[in-house]
Image (cartoon, rainbow, N blue to C red):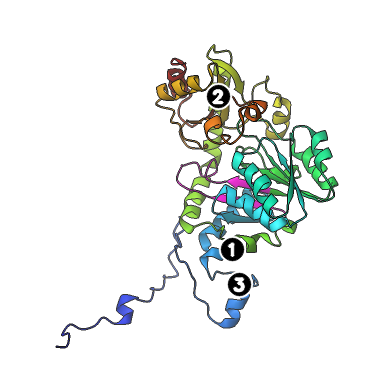
Amino acid sequence: MPDPSPRPKAEDICPRPASIPENIHSHAPPIYPASVYRCESTSQAERLLAGEEAGFVYSRDGHPNGAMLAEKCRELHGAERAVMCSSGMAALAAAALGVLKPGDHVVASNQLYGRSLKLLVDELTRWGVASSVVDTCDLAAVRAACTKQTKLVVVETISNPVLRVADIGALAQVAHDHGAALLVDNTFASPALCRPLELGADLVLESLTKVMNGHSDVLLGMLCGRAAWFERIPGTIGTWGLSAPPFDCWLAWRGLATLAVRFERAADNALAIAKWLTGRKEVTAVHYPGLTTHPDHALAQRQFGERFGTVVTITLGGDTPAADRFIAAARRVPFCPSLGELSTTLSHPASTSHRTLSVEARRALGIEGGTLRLSIGIESCEEIKQAIAEGLAAV
């Protein structure tokens, strides 16, 4: 027997989107979750895909939320170009894939984040790119490591986890003397503290996951810099699938609205906490550029001014067992291996970011089993002290 129920029409299943009235002007930007956008003609599609006309075709190659966030980041850094990526590591990969070719050479700081070093040393070697890992606080060592094939020098503004400060202007000069670009990972600083392009850097990456977003709810990266270095980078991001999703871009755009006030409060807290921790019997070392005892304090003052970042790294006497006792007792300071959140968190570099290094290699960087990296939040300073004191009491 024939089915008596009427079959739905195609337009009922997939209705055409209603047009938005021209008088709708939302204060907050909308989210554009679309994977694809309509083209009016074959010639327009060609122009859009060639970058000759502003607009979007396929979300992997660009979308409105990514464009809005990239423009905001470009302004914050004073850059000529900015692009969004799916993570900070994707931003580093985009820079490497877009700038380097087989036969090139990279000089990398020995204090880079562990995964960054793995990408620049282990992974790039597979693609015919050589690398040298040096102490970038030693300008003579950087100069000696550079060759005629060097195309990229990579450093962190503030290193992870012992917070050494890179002399960006001097490093840029060394890189440029050898025809190379200086790429600065500015994640620990953010543009609220440092704008490396103004100091001579060519490319800057940020893990927006951290300070710039600040709410522990996105995974996102950004790469910005001088236009001359962006000939291949945007296409590389689409080709290698390094693109950022619209919703994460929308969340990070929202997070940027409070970057300045969040950073000021957390950095002021961090300086107070670093001073408070100095001299405590449970703590054998306190690393923070705002302390006069820090080896880069004068450089930090010259580059940053009156604030020095939101991370304080300490080493406890008693090695890893002491760190475990602290973590178990400091219940209000969760062990979350990231940074830049609203609340104070901690990380244990020896078991997370630097776990692949030997004990000797970690020790050479100042990382012991009792080293803890504290990402200071925006709570009241007294509340943070009380939370840390609970951990120290167990050490």
Asked if residue 62 shows in the view, the reply is no
Q: Nearer the viewer, residue 87 or 129?
A: 129
How far apart are the two marked residues, 3 and 1, measured between alpha carbons?
A: 11 Å
Q: Residue at x 43, y 31 (%)?
A: 334
Q: Nearer the viewer, mark 3 or mark 2?
A: 2
Q: Nearer the viewer, mark 1 or mark 2?
A: 2
| Residue 160 position by quadrant | top right
Q: Is residue 211 above or below residue 105?
A: above
Quadrant into which the N terminus falls: bottom left
**Callout 2: SS:** loop
**Callout 1: SS:** helix
Residue wearing tag 1: 238
| Residue 131 position by quadrant | top right
Q: Residue at x 76, y 44 (%)?
A: 200
Q: Residue at x 70, y 25 (%)?
A: 297
Q: Which residues are magenta?
A: 204-226
Q: Is residue 91 above or below residue 343?
A: below
Check disc 2: other Cα within 10 Å, few if <14, some if 14-19, many if 20+.
many
